Image: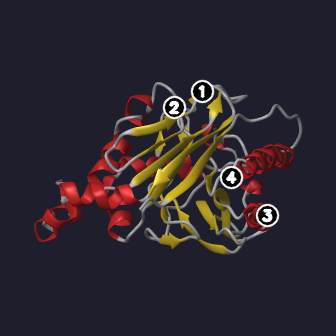
Amino acid sequence: MSRIVKCGHIQASVPEVEGSVQDIKEAMVKKHEELVDKAGKQGVQILCLQEIFHGPYFCAEQDTKWYATAEKVPGPLTDRFSDYARKYKMVIVLPVYEEAIEGVYYNTAAIIDADGSYLGKFRKAHIPHTWPGFWEKFYFKPGTTDFPVFQTAYAKIGVYICYDRHFPECARILALKGAEILFNPSATVAGKSEYLWALEQPAQAAANGVFIGANNRVGVEKPWEFGEFYGSSYFCDPKGQILVKGSRDKTEIVTADLDLEEIRKTRDGWQFFRDRRPELYGDICGQLPD
């Protein structure tokens, strides 16, 4: 018997807005409200927005002015999008720049259930600081939430954010905790990561017998123009097969119908979880050699 869940990604460019960082934030929020409304009318049941959806990828520079765009989670943005979740009976993965206390900030994804209730959050665990333009340690403290699994109205879901996808432990932990669909909201550019984009997560989906949805923004963001965000948001199945893939350069909603019964069928065939030997894996938690 099928258990089909209609899932979606929003991949979007940043509108050209003159004004303060708050003006830019509000313009991006309004753009996403229109897209969330459209996704709801299409019958999307679980919707994932891109990493820090409410602004540009400001980590291309190091400037304290962007701290002003952070907010509490739950807070104004989760309240605002809870209305859409309730209206369309839609689960929303809402990636937000979070202010925990004054001067302490996280890269966070809030989970809103189909009745508009706030289920909890995941804070990005691995924080890159690499050239060119990924100065994230200037903006984010490493996450403190471990890897929670959220029982939503439609499926058990887990989240890991952007750079976390390069660490296979994230997907493995979430799968072992019972997550059926993993979401990876991202902001990543051509030339740096694109060769891994369609390689790593399908492999992790197959290794763990889960669905994975990978999300990326589009466009070249001013004034930095340090790289092209290449979109290509997709969903892959428990065999690692890509089911649907978005364009490289267009703001759009990318949707797929995921049959959760495929998880059991795939795992019954491969039995990776039965045959794993965690008692032999202690070294994976060790330190690098001197």
Looking at the image, tell me whether mark 4 or mark 2 is earlier in sequence order: 4
Q: Is residue 244 visible?
A: yes
Furthest toward the left, the residue is 280
Give the residue displayed 37% in from the left and 47% down from the top. Answer: 166
- Residue 120 image position (x, y, % from top left): 59, 73
The answer to the question of whether label 2 and label 1 lie on touching residues, with beta carbons closer than 8 A, is: yes
Looking at the image, tell me whether mark 4 or mark 1 is earlier in sequence order: 4
Left or right for 164, reference 108? left
Looking at the image, tell me whether mark 2 or mark 1 is earlier in sequence order: 2
- Residue 194 image position (x, y, % from top left): 44, 30
Looking at the image, tell me whether mark 1 or mark 3 is earlier in sequence order: 3
- Dot 4: what SS? loop
Give the residue displayed 12% in from the left and 71% down from the top. Answer: 279
Distance between mark 4 and mark 3 Cα atoms? 11 Å
Give the residue displayed 18% in from the left and 60% down from the top. Answer: 271
Nearer the viewer's eye, disc 4 or disc 3? 4
Left or right for 107, reference 200? right
Q: Mark 4 points at which residue?
A: 43
Looking at the image, tell me whether mark 3 or mark 2 is earlier in sequence order: 3
Q: Is residue 106 visible?
A: no
Q: What amino acid does circle 1 point to?
A: Phe
Q: Mark 2 points at which residue?
A: 132
Q: Mark 3 points at which residue?
A: 87
Q: Which class describes the residues within 10 Å of circle 1: few (<14), some (14-19), or many (20+)?
A: some
Q: What amino acid does circle 4 point to?
A: Gly
Distance between mark 3 and mark 2 Cα atoms? 41 Å
Q: In this view, does 170 lie above or below 136?
A: below
Q: What amino acid does circle 2 point to?
A: Pro
